[in-house]
Amino acid sequence: MSTSIVIVISILASLSFLLVKHTLRPKKPPLPPGPKGLPLLSNIRDLPPPGTLEWPHWQSHKEKYGPITSVSVLGQNFVILHDRQVIMDLLETRAMKSASRPKLVFAGDIVGYDGVMGLMPYNRTFRMHRKLTTTQVSPRSITRFEPIQELEILRLLKRLHQDPNSQKLPDHLNQYVFLTTPEVDTH
């Protein structure tokens, strides 16, 4: 086989591979409007020059292309949000995907604290827990615990009066917390 045939077959195989790869690739949603880039370099010439303020440059993009624009630099796409309302809408509608906590395997899975509100991912369960917590411990709802706290404070003072030994003060305080907490939890 001659070298020219091998070269032609290699070129045809490469072109068919690229064509198949391009057609089978999943379709990405279109990017927001932005300046057209050069092949390979993309929009590298559309970046603000070094040593200048960036915001006037991106403000000109807002005037040309709208509140959401995009540029691509060396194959990396950047979406630029110019409007505060657009940013707030995106954060509110996509908060479950973008604002979750990192998964802590040791604390959550191994130790078993995955049901603790501070370690929960941001999802429906977390929002339900947060809603219940705010209704239970809001300044208005906490007033219903005052009679329980007053009763237990009187009992604590009585115990301290009967046994004024300062070395037992931690025991008395622990007993106060121990007796008050179940009462508050059950209400």
Image (cartoon, grey):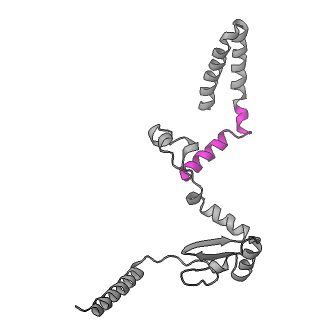
Residue at the far front in the pictured view: 3
- Where 186 falls versus 134 (above or below)? above
Tell me the residue at 58%/45% (across/down). Answer: 129
**Is the N terminus in the top left, top right, bottom left or bottom right quadrant?**
bottom left
- Where 19 falls versus 79 (above or below)? below
Residue at the far left in the pictured view: 1
Give the left or right position of residue 2, taking residue 69 as reference.
Answer: left
Q: Position of residue 113 (x, y in %)?
A: 51, 39
Tell me the residue at 63%/30% (across/down). Answer: 184
How many discs appear?
0
Q: Position of residue 61 (x, y in %)?
A: 71, 79
Is residue 136 within the magenta segment?
yes
Tell me the residue at 61%/63% (across/down). Answer: 93
Is residue 46 within the magenta segment?
no
Q: Position of residue 44 (x, y in %)?
A: 62, 78
- Range drawn in magenta: 122-144
In this orientation, which residue lies closer to the viewer: 110 or 136?
Answer: 110
Query: In terms of image quadrants, where is residue 75?
Result: bottom right
Q: Position of residue 175 (x, y in %)?
A: 62, 18
Query: In terms of image quadrants, where is residue 116?
Result: top right
Would you say the magenta stretch is mainly helix, strand or loop?
A: helix
Give the left or right position of residue 25, taking residue 78 as reference.
Answer: left
Tell me the residue at 74%/80% (across/down). Answer: 63
In this orientation, which residue lies closer to the viewer: 33 or 85?
Answer: 33
In this orientation, which residue lies closer to the viewer: 3 or 20?
Answer: 3
**Is the C terminus in the top left, top right, bottom left or bottom right quadrant?**
top right
